[in-house]
Amino acid sequence: MSFWRRGDNSNTEMYGLLVDASSANGSTMWTNLPKFNMLNMTAAVMFNGASLLPFPSFIKAADTGIVSAEFHLQQVKKDVHGGTDVINLHEDLPCTEETIDRQHPRSLVNCFVDKENFDRLLENGDRLTITFKVSSGGYRQLYDSGSHTTAGTEYFQGHLVEKSVAFYFDFDMPAYQSPDQAFHLSPEFTKVEFIPTSDD
């Protein structure tokens, strides 16, 4: 996520946030930066399924792998009056670098999606979640050896895997409170007279 100053025939990145979601539980980031107008999302996934056995005579072709990959954006606006939070943005952004579907499963997918004109107002308490969703699956093409024709195609769906990054926006000023006794040093060491001595 970044904020770019645009106009005057120049684009300048003013600031940005880079978050890695490769950990098991995804990632969460809190920020007090008020404006973002560009999202750059990158993900890579590899299919690690078992190899297919040799085809019997009634199967003409078959393949398994990744059959769908997309980013999902969701912005939730917090109700500051204690009511129900509202989903303000709900958008799917598919990976478009190559054809990915049940008929064309992939063993490796690199996905790059840029949303260059992110125009949502981000307010205190908002949460923006970016989720990368990947599904496995495949197909098998049936063959009728008696008539020597294709008898149809069967498709199957495997597993859905998701990883998320959540950005929490907090624009409130910090509340300062006087520290309790656990943070007091007694006596105050900066007010104790220090006299250096020597063993000479």
Image (spheres, rainbow, N blue to C red):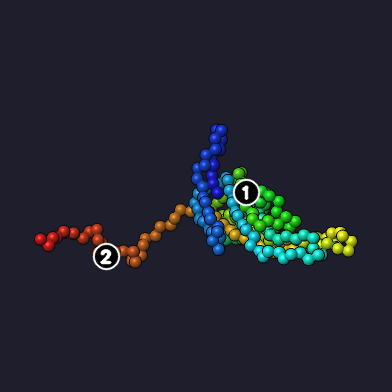
Q: Is residue 119 visible?
A: no
Which residue carries the number 1 mark?
Answer: 113
How dense is the environment of label 2, judged by Cα within 10 Å: few (below 14), some, or many (20 and up)? few
Question: What residue sits 75% from the left and 60% below the top?
Answer: 62
Please state if 92 lies on the left or on the right of 16 as rendered. right
Callout 1, which amino acid? Val
Question: What residue sits 71% from the left and 61% below the top?
Answer: 64
Vertical side of 57 occupied by 117: above or below: above
Rendering coords of residue 18 (x, y %): 52, 51
Which residue carries the number 2 mark?
Answer: 186
Rendering coords of residue 92 (x, y %): 67, 53
Q: Which of these two is toward me, 188 or 197? A: 197
Q: Is residue 107 visible?
A: yes
Rendering coords of residue 190 (x, y %): 24, 58
> Are the residues at dot 2 and dot 1 in contact (C-beta closer than 8 Å)?
no
Question: What residue sits 44% from the left and 55% below the top?
Answer: 174
Q: Which of marks 2 and 1 is nearer the N terminus?
A: 1
The quadrant the C terminus occupies is: bottom left
Rendering coords of residue 177 (x, y %): 39, 60
How dense is the environment of label 1, judged by Cα within 10 Å: few (below 14), some, or many (20 and up)? some
Name the residue at the right extreme: 147
Question: Label for residue 96?
Answer: none
Callout 2, which amino acid? Ser
Q: Which of these two is toward me, 37 or 106? A: 106
Question: What residue sits 53% from the left and 54% below the top?
Answer: 19
Residue 55 lies in quadrant: bottom right
Residue 131 lies in quadrant: bottom right
Name the residue at the top extreme: 8
Q: Which of these two is toward me, 21 or 145? A: 145
The mark total stands at: 2
SS under mark 2: loop
